[in-house]
Image: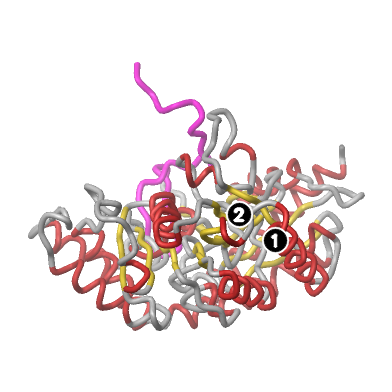
Amino acid sequence: MTALSPHLRQATPVVAARGEGVHLYGEDGRRYLDFTAGIGVTSTGHCHPKVVAAAQEQVATLVHGQYTTVMHQPLRRLVEKLGEVLPAGLDSLFFTNSGSEAVEAALRLARQATGRPNIIVCHGGFHGRTVAAASMTTSGTRFRSGFSPLMSGVVVTPFPSAYRYGWDEETATRFALKELDYTLQTISSPADTAAIIVEPVLGEGGYVPATRAFLEGLRERADRHGFLLILDEVQTGVGRTGRFWGHDHFGVTPDILVTAKGLASGFPLSGIAASEELMTKAWPGSQGGTYGANAVACAAACATLDVVRDEKLVENAETMGKRLRHGLEAVADRTPGIGDVRGLGLMLATEFVTEDGSPDPETAARVQRAAVDEGLLLLLCGAWNQVVRMIPALVIDETAVDEGLQAWATAVEVGTSGAARR
């Protein structure tokens, strides 16, 4: 009898039958608040009517027009629509299927454009599971162990994770930039450095936002030394943080932007954006792929961007994010085992710690399981899986936020009482 790999374990016991907005319905008919959004993918909620209609119409006309063989209108429309929201100057696009593929496309472009071999990554970053992307991932050994040798030319520098270091943000930022300068002096000289890649908010690394001074420091060093700044917006893009792009919080523009996840409301689509001048430096034949820019995925992405604009979902993410964070902080204030609440917009997390401040993955797991019993679906992240994250669809309203917070409060009480009995 065939079955899924035993390592594909679901984070919850739910067998989903259908989804609608911020809710999933199990085969048993029970309704769940989905604060996972398919790991940040269903940005407009489950089965948004306008996205569904666009996909249905496209399925009936052209499912796949391989875009290095023929051109199709959904792709043309998507390029035009992205031009309305991309940073000025990033006017050339390449599409593929997953975040990992897009990250690798950005890496390839950076190396080919600069003629330099090395890529600097930030400690705690997640960029994917394929070989090159996993080689650039430092959020946990589970993503990169067991299939060495990994890609060479990857150098790791600190991220300003203030809570982990036990410092304020200014001190953590100053340390991270000082260590980057030391890295450029001792490990990867500027002449060997093609790019530095960073998430505006660490994803799998624990939902830790960057700081303005840190990203400004990266931009200044990239300009001074002639290497590129790549921003991995796979999880932070398309309104997730209460700005259209995560880097909009920090006033810094990348040379290459990577996008995926929420771009097409659940259809597989990713891409990179760069200036035409930079993109032309890619070597002939280096960009392509069978399924990239699939017509149905492009149609869904066009509808997604329309919904995000017309329903003001970026603004909603900011407003509902503040409401959700306020509630999470209230729970944290009365829970000794919660060390930190952090994030931006609707990308929020709670970190659980023991009495001595060490990571507490056992309690985080108990709380996450207890939340399922309360009808709330959540995911873990962080190096020890000690962080519970919340990434609901951008269509969430006050009623759903408050319902989720009520379930969260109960789950925390149940989960932490288990910790007290240890």
Where residue 233 sits in the image (x, y, percent)? 49, 65
Q: Is residue 19 left or right of residue 76?
A: right
Q: Are marks 2 and 1 in contact (CB under 8 Å)?
A: yes
User: Would you name the residue on which mark 2 appears?
Assistant: 125
Where residue 60 sits in the image (x, y, percent)? 9, 58
Q: Is residue 240 magenta?
A: no
- Residue at point 12% right, 63% down? 71
Principal secondary structure, stretch drawn in magenta: loop
Q: Residue extending furthest top?
A: 1
Please state the extent of the stretch shown in magenta in the rendering: 1-28
- Residue at point 65% right, 68% down? 209
The answer to whether residue 10 is above or below residue 31 is: above
Where residue 121 sits in the image (x, y, percent)? 60, 55
User: Would you name the residue on which mark 1 appears?
Assistant: 159
The answer to whether residue 86 is above or below residue 164 is: below
Q: Is residue 56 visible?
A: yes
Q: Quadrant of the N terminus?
A: top left
- Badge 1 amino acid: Phe
SS at mark 1?
A: loop
- Residue at point 60% right, 74% down? 224
SS at mark 2?
A: loop
Measure the alpha-carbon separation of dots 2 and 1: 8 Å
Specify few, some or many for label 2: CA neighbours under 10 Å numbering under 14, 14-19, or 20 or more.
Answer: many
